[in-house]
Amino acid sequence: KSITVNGPTHYAIYAHELFKEFFQANPNFKGTHIIKTGNNKPFYVANLRDKNGTGFSSLISTTGANTLYFPHIVNGGGYTLEMILQNLENFSQNVAVNFFKQDGSPNSLPPEAYTITLAPNGVNKFTTTGKGEINVGWGTAKSSNLEGKITGTAVYDFNNNQVSVSHSSPSTEHGMSAIINNNKRTGLAITNPTDKYAELTLIAIDKIGNEA
């Protein structure tokens, strides 16, 4: 399956919606998503799994960086967002957090102003109000110190069901767990933060190596 993600934009979809015929023929699928760029443009991915819309789990882990990219941000419509940031250095850092709409334009989430001060090796966090209609997009957290590294997690709460999603690292290829059955669905959120489009190829591979 090939898609084009213009920059800077956000794209989110369930795997079974991308590969409808394959998953209809294979209703109990376990395997891997492989996502490759065809024009050598790095992108960011978050991988989520839900249980019939009642509970979510995160399928990502990552390391520290100066700028963190969160490919999927949700607030409102029953969702609140808690952002937890950790300083990996022995000096303090000021971190600017910015949110963007799916089309890449600035996105204001209440309480809107997010400049976080992290003590040496410290942790800080904030929580959105969750007010208003559902608001989906992506976000960044950037240290003012170019030599500083931070790490972070976004925690979504929907009707007291929480899921944490770490930031993503840039790459021209990502591989992620995939599962589709009567109870669980895997979804992908892709962010292209550049001003250039990215041509992506998405491949579903089952647990014995067969390609969708």
Image (tube, rainbow, N blue to C red):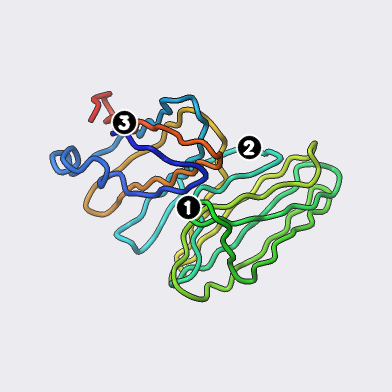
> Do the residues bearing badges 1 and 3 touch, measured as CB atoms within 8 Å?
no
Q: CA distance from mark 2 to mark 3?
A: 25 Å
Name the residue beneath numbered marker 3: 203
Mark nearer the N terminus (1 vs 2):
2
Identified by mark 1, the residue type is Asp
Vertical placement of 24 versus 96: above or below? Answer: above
SS assignment at label 2: loop
Left of 149 or right of it: where is 18?
left
**Residue drawn 52% across the image and 45% down it:** 8
- Indicate which disc residue 127 carries: none
Q: Is residue 47 above or below residue 135?
A: above
**Residue 126: quarter of image:** bottom right
Q: Residue furthest right?
A: 91
Q: Amino acid at mark 3?
A: Ile
- How busy is the neighbourhood of tag 2: few (under 14 within 10 Å), some, or many (20 plus)? few
Image marks 2 and 3: residues in contact by CB distance under 8 Å? no
Q: CA distance from mark 1 to mark 3?
A: 25 Å
Q: Nearer the viewer, residue 181 or 199?
A: 199
Q: Which residue is mark 2?
A: 63
Instruction: Report the Cα–Cα distance between label 1 and label 2.
Output: 27 Å
Who's the residue at 46% across and 36% down the image? 197
In this view, 124 is above or below 128: above
Q: Secondary structure at mark 1?
A: loop
**Type of amino acid under label 2:** Thr
Q: Position of residue 149 (x, y in %)?
A: 74, 40
Q: Earlier in the sequence, mark 2 or mark 3?
A: 2
On the image, the x and y values in percent for residue 33 come to: 35, 34
Q: Residues within 10 Å of mark 1 (few under 14, many from 20)?
A: some
Looking at the picture, tell me which residue is in the foreground, 180 or 2.
Answer: 2
